[in-house]
Image (cartoon, rainbow, N blue to C red):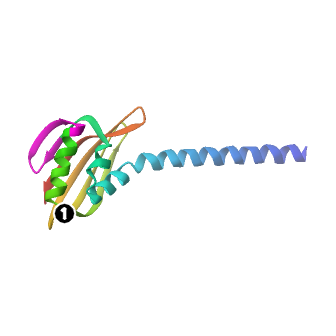
Amino acid sequence: MNGQYIMKRLLLITLLGIFSFNFASAQQNDQDVFTPIGKYIQAGDCEKLSAWFADNLELDILGAINNCTRNQAKLIMKNFFTNYTPKKFTIIHKSGKAPMKYAVGSLSAGGEKFRVILFVKTTDNVNSIQQLKIEAE
């Protein structure tokens, strides 16, 4: 009986450990959506950044508002990164929860400072940028 008790307890501890790990991983993935996006903004990598774009999204770049396709948005961001080479990007605030999250970041690019606002929607466990706004600070 003592052996059965130990085996049941070991099984329970193992199952709790697996559940805790999966729950923590799911939470971490949910919170980290802005990490790769921020990395691509800092790198000025419009190719990898555009992979996060929704099929249709709103871009507001220095007051020029565009409702555009993923490919159009990629070209607009390429133009922005050409004119303002990114040096540093930092997320300064994150909020919301699935299905809609947002982040505010600070971008140093081309010798100027910008505020970047990102709205990300989660649909069927896929995160996509619905709106990206860049304004001068």
Measured as percent of width and height from the top left, residue 116 is found at 21, 53
User: Which one is in front, 130 or 28?
Assistant: 130
Task: Give the image location of residue 33, x and y in percent.
Answer: 38, 48
Task: Indicate left or right for 93 with 137 as reference.
Answer: right
Q: Is residue 129 left or right of residue 63?
A: right
Q: Is residue 134 left or right of residue 44?
A: left
Along the viewing direction, whichever of 18 and 132 lies nearer the viewer: 132
Q: Is residue 86 left or right of residue 4?
A: left
| The residue positioned farthest toward the top in the image shown | 124
Q: Which residues are magenta?
A: 59-71
Mark 1 residue type? Ala
Q: Residue at x 47, y 50 (%)?
A: 28
Q: For the point 79% across and 43% down, which residue is it?
A: 8
SS class, disc 1: strand
For image coordinates 65% across by 49% down, the residue present is 17
The residue under label 1 is 109
Question: Which image quadrant is residue 121 in?
Answer: top left
The answer to whether 47 is drawn above or below residue 86 in the figure is above
Give the quadrant of the C terminus.
bottom left
Q: Which quadrant of the figure has residue 81?
A: bottom left
Residue visible at 23% across and 39% down in the picture: 71
Residue 63 belongs to magenta span: yes
- How many other residues sit within 10 Å of disc 1, few (<14), some (14-19) or many (≥20)? some
- Number of residue marks: 1
Residue 31, given in percent of the width and then of the height, sits at 41, 49
Quarter of image, res 58: top left
